[in-house]
Image (tube, rainbow, N blue to C red):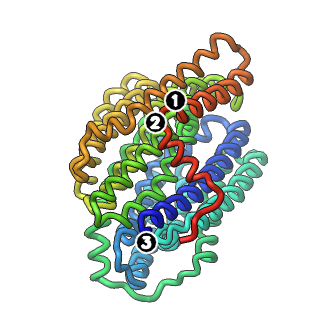
Amino acid sequence: MAEENLKSKTKKGLIWSALGNVANQGIRFVLGLVLARLLSPDAYGVIGMLTIFICVISIFIDCGFSQALIAKKDRTKIDFSTEFWFNVGVGILGYMVLFIISPFVADFYKMPILSPILKVIGLGVIVNSLCVVQSAQLSIRLDFKTSAKISVFSQCISGVVGIVFAYQGLGVWALVIQQLMGSIMNACCLWVIVRWMPSFEFSVESFRYLWRYGSKVLFSSLITQIHDNIYPLIIGKFYNSASLGLYSRAQAFAALPSSNIANVLGNVTFPVLCTVNDDKDRLASVYRNLVRLSAFIVFPLMLGMLVLSEPLVHVLLNAQWYDCILLLQVLCLAMVWQPISLVNLNLLKAAKRTDVLLKLDIVKRTIGLIILVVTCQVSVFAIAVGYAFLALFSVILNTVCTSRVLNVSFIMQMKDIVSIFLNSMVMACVVGSLSLFITNDYVLLFSGVVVGALYYFVSGNLFFKEEIQNVKYMLKKKVNKE
């Protein structure tokens, strides 16, 4: 009964998280296409240059405390209040840091406009700090339905506002206003819907517990974010904003299926794994099922996008973006592993092995920086290739570490996904061969999607019946009452 109850909760969580992410990413994708036709690659490049500063400050707002509360069994009201006041204090301090460094950032890139942009877009840091606890409470309840509705609503409003300002000729400021409006709408919705109010309490004991768990998550996230966002910083510094805009657009395309699935899995798998973290055998079983399910979904999507990248870009964008095609193909190879790695890391957090998580990130990011230092001397394309190599190395290293935590061998975990990967490769070859006979981009894109889906459906029913059954179970309209 408990197993079925967990499966039902996981199903509902995955469905609503998936619906929310698909709708959210779909809306963002469509709105992004409209904005890409109204704005130049330079505008996106300018925002990309500031991403690392916003992301690093944002990490300090939470410090991993939300995940500490999700993993904690006996959480109290004072725990939530302690986190809230900490979040707000760090949010205000973080914005002050962004405000102070904004002139130096502009001098670093030799672009004076970056200073006022960072001061305005940085206000989102304070806004986001006000709703971290509310988001955590929805995750604890596995209430991804509410999260999905809030996310989609906020994305729609901010996207329309961004398009209006872009149409009015505000250029990069349209993107600034869009991001800030999205944060404001998200925060307002969470406060109204969750209806949680902090008490004027701050517990030192509670803070110590949150810090013991969250500090390692904080440093791990900090290392990851600095590493991942140093790519736009390096490209913007050593090349130009147009090159960064092309890289950012390729990354946005590649992230559409990969990050969408990764977000779904990240939102759901961590609280689900936390519910069984006191039973290693059950934890291992749930973990392996989640890995296979994510591989079965993400592998064909990413490899399919790789072989259809040229007609995809030709159909959806204009000629000024065509140079991003090769970058997109390489980044598809990199991001094919993203959801698998995320499930690996969520397992370590659920098992309360954040010490292993931190060590992993130190090793991976150190190697990543070495690769970046070498590849940035060559070209933007070389940087993307280095990133793809790092992604493959990371998923292997993550799997080795999870095998030790769970006593599930590396070979066994690889066997779980290698057949799925090979089948997806065959599908990609079948779809890619269509370009030998079809020259029209619209026809090629449409037929490639249809042929790829048909092949995968047939091969899945023949060779991957368990995964097909899991997908069908997730897609059933009726959910058993708990």
Nearer the N terminus, badge 3 or badge 2? Answer: 3
User: What residue does disc 3 label?
Assistant: 87
Give the Cα distance between marks 3 and 1. 40 Å
Q: Residue furthest top?
A: 436
Q: Residue at x 47, y 43 (%)?
A: 466
User: What residue does disc 1 label?
Assistant: 303
Q: Position of residue 225 (x, y in %)?
A: 39, 49
Q: Residue at x 59, y 41 (%)?
A: 44
On screen, residue 399 above or below 307: below
Q: Tag 3's secondary structure?
A: helix
Nearer the N terminus, badge 2 or badge 1? Answer: 1
Choose mark 3 or mark 1, whichever is in front.
Answer: 1
Q: Position of residue 386 (x, y in %)?
A: 37, 29
Q: Residues within 10 Å of mark 3 (few under 14, many from 20)?
A: many
Q: Residue at x 42, y 62 (%)?
A: 272
- Do tag 3 and tag 2 residues touch (Cβ < 8 Å)? no
User: What residue does disc 2 label?
Assistant: 336
For the question of whether residue 335 can be seen, the reply is: yes
Indicate left or right for 186 with 335 as reference.
right
Q: Position of residue 34 (x, y in %)?
A: 73, 41
Residue type pointed to by label 3: Asn
Q: Tag 1's secondary structure?
A: helix
On screen, residue 156 above or below 420: below
